Amino acid sequence: MARTLISGGTVVTATDTTAADVLIDGERVVAVGSDLGAQAEQVIDATGRLVMPGGIDVHTHMEMPFGGTFSSDDFATGTAAAAWGGTTTIVDFAVPEHGESLQTTAQRWHQKAGPKAHVDYGFHMIVREVNEQTLADMDALVDQGITSFKLFMAYPGVFMVDDASLFRAMSRSGENGALIMLHAENGGPIDVLIQRYLAEGRTDPVNHGLTRPASMEGEATHRAIALAELAGVAVYIVHLSSTDALNAVREARDNGVAALAETCPQYLFLSADDLARPGFEGAKYVCSPPLRPKPHQAELWNGLRSDDLQLVATDHCPFHFKQQKEMGLGNFAKIPNGLPGVEDRYTLLYDGGVRLGQVSLNRFVELVATAPAKLFGLYPRKGTIAPGSDADIVVFDPDTERVLSASTHHMNVDYSCYEGHHVHGVPEVVLQRGQVLVDHGKLLAQAGQGKFLARSRTTL
Ligand code: URP
Ligand code: ZN
Ligand code: ZN
């Protein structure tokens, strides 16, 4: 493979911003500095551009079964869209069928991803029940590079596990080095509210949010952290959406407890007002936890600045509006939960985060690439630009203005949550392991060229 020079740009990592060239040999970065040109056969001109690590999205659901249907992106369409959007690594959630062994699920997910992925990928494993077999399977999966497990405190009868099961899984992770990730909403009372609302004829999408109050996310987050503290392990809260939950994480961290959390673009840029759009339009915004009233957004930005929230992932879980979201016409509880977003995260966070002064450019890189790599066992191979790291690089044009739309995005979904949203910035050239995946809007990546990443255990 030829040596490539990315020349004339501003190289940005989580710690530094430097005018420098980047020399790539094969799959790896070999030098960052000046006067490197003579060593390269191929040059990518990055004049006026930011040269940043490829994005790492640690929360995606490709072809995920949910409520009698499947999320509409598979590994082919979803990872191509990720590449277009500057994300070069995803970590997807493998979902066991009822009673299926976690080992079998892992094999199924390898079969789904391997021939299709355009970018590198790893897996988390969802755990629906905790017994001797699943605990033993967890040990084995950690050794195979699947080092994180998601359990649910919501969706009774589908995914929800009880506190004893959570505690057992957490205790085991103390022995095998895995990281337990939690969907923290108290599913019991939420389900009672849902039944009550439906009985009262309150069936519109807005009721999805009203039946899942932030207090129930705060309560579950607090309980999750208390259980993890009792087990003596770290815990990671996924898709944190509210001040209530953030306060639980903050309080724990202030007391030296290892509580970690992500938030998602939808909680930073969308709100309960979107769920309340007229007619059935709000169904486009149904996800769990639900979009919150706007005042929560400022608190989440505070959390991202103070490192009470460590990173931003998408929870990409798209369903078409036609026929899929429409399954919930007349009953909000039947609207499949989830939003599309894998393509938009990098630019949305740059535009709404860096350009609007919410976070520094270096913190942006940390949130979208470096911290995900560190927390999920991929660093320093991924998540930075340094000699020895994989050459996963985004040459980012920070100035070009564009309008996000379903008519131009590449995700396999018939609407955009950000339709008409005006942004600055475009991932112009996207490289993975030295190969150009996307060049000025043209996809060069092939399905199947993404590699499975056996991840290390999290070290804090
Ligand atoms: O609504 C959501 N978040 N759908 C995806 C599944 C999950 O809980 O992450
Ligand atoms: Zn979840
Ligand atoms: Zn999710």
Image (spheres, rainbow, N blue to C red):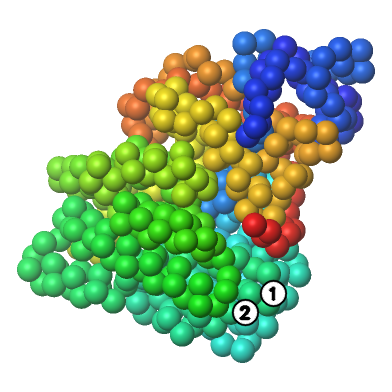
Name the residue carrying label 2: 172
Q: Residue at x 48, y 57 (%)?
A: 253
Question: Looking at this view, is 350 or 257 the one in front?
Answer: 257
Q: Quadrant of residue 156?
A: bottom left
Which quarter of the figure is the N terminus placed in?
Answer: top right
Other residues around mark 2 within 10 Å, as few (<14) / some (14–19) / many (≥20)? many
Q: Are marks 1 and 2 in contact (CB under 8 Å)?
A: yes
Q: Residue at x 46, y 49 (%)?
A: 308
Disc 1 marks which residue?
176
394 relative to 387 in the view: left or right: left
Secondary structure of the residue carrying numbered label 1 = helix
Is residue 102 rendered to the left or right of residue 295? Answer: right
Displayed quadrant of residue 33: top right
* Whether residue 170 is situated above or below residue 66 in the rendered picture: below
Relative to 281, say whether 356 is above or below. above
Above or below residue 337? Residue 300 is above
**Amino acid type for the residue under numbered disc 1:** Asn
Residue 74 can be seen, yes or no: no
Quadrant of the snapshot with the C terminus = bottom right
